[in-house]
Image: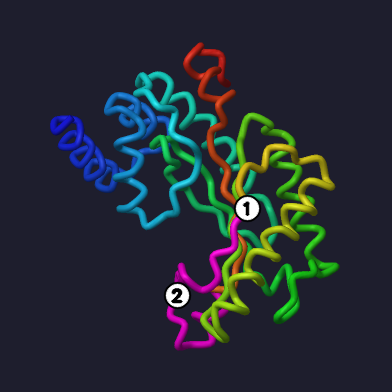
Amino acid sequence: MRSIKVLAVALCAGMVMTGCNNFQKGAAIGAAGGAALGAVVGKIAGNTVVGAAVGTAVGAGTGALIGRHMDKVKKQAEAVQNAQVQEIEDANGFKGVKVTFDSGILFATNSSTLSSSANSCITQIANVLNQNSDVDVAIFGHTDSTGNDAINDPLSLKRAQAVEKSLKSKGVSTIKRVEGQGSHNPVADNSTAEGKKQNRRVEVYMYASEQMVKEAEAGTLK
């Protein structure tokens, strides 16, 4: 186990230095033993770890195929208007995609009702998800630090649930997790107006489903 952890740290350092693509990262992750490395990478990257651990180490080929597949998903997501798209590590160490929407695009101040202008954004991300039914989804809502937890925690959850409801109405059936995180996970400085704006957001995570893992293990994932 100690040798796996050492290898995991070494691989993490190598990934940062080389800037390899998802296919290459996936191969390295698979070789190291997915779940253990995924936890390490997730903490280093500062990402919320999503997904359910597969429970056993996967082969290099499995990780590589999933990484290559998620490269395609990321490219599709990058076409969504008003969305910030990033790579993430899921709970298994596989590559995933995080799509972030500034809540000002989706909601009025202190509201959890989607604005009329939000429909286009939600429709576009729904199209990506419906084209990739082997991708599982998690939705997290966030607020800035204005107010208190009694206000912010339920507001962030209601916003995440509003996005969930809209996606489901557009045919998305792979949402596995919906959370409101209030102001507890800021990405910017809450002492500035710009920082608060960045912290008011909804994040849509896309990561490998059990189906995708099985297809990758069988070598049939494209």
Quadrant in which residue 3 is drawn = top left
**Region of the chain picked out in magenta, as a range:** 179-198
- Quadrant in the picture for the C terminus: top right
The secondary element bearing badge 2 is classed as loop
Give x and y (percent) for residue 64: 42, 26
Give x and y (percent) for residue 88: 45, 47
Residue that badge 2 annotates: 188
Query: Residue sitting at 58 percent across and 74 percent down?
Result: 143
Give the mark nearest the N terminus, 1 or 2.
1
Quadrant in which residue 181 is drawn = bottom right
161, 124: nearer the viewer: 161
Above or below, comparing residue 92 to residue 211 in the picture: below
Query: Mark 1 against mark 2, which lies toward the viewer?
Result: 1
Above or below, comparing residue 91 to residue 193 in the picture: above
Near mark 1 (Cα within 10 A), the count class, few <14, some 14-19 or many ≥20, is some
Residue that badge 1 annotates: 178
130, 113: nearer the viewer: 113
Give x and y (percent) for residue 128: 70, 41
177, 94: nearer the viewer: 177
The dominant secondary structure in magenta is: loop
Find the distance from the CA under tag 1 to the CA under tag 2. 22 Å
Query: Residue sitting at 18 percent across and 34 percent down?
Result: 7
User: What amino acid does circle 2 point to?
Assistant: Ala
- Relative side of 111 to 181, left or right: right
Near mark 2 (Cα within 10 A), the count class, few <14, some 14-19 or many ≥20, is some
The secondary element bearing badge 1 is classed as strand
Query: Residue sitting at 64 percent across and 70 percent down?
Result: 154
User: What amino acid does circle 1 point to?
Assistant: Val
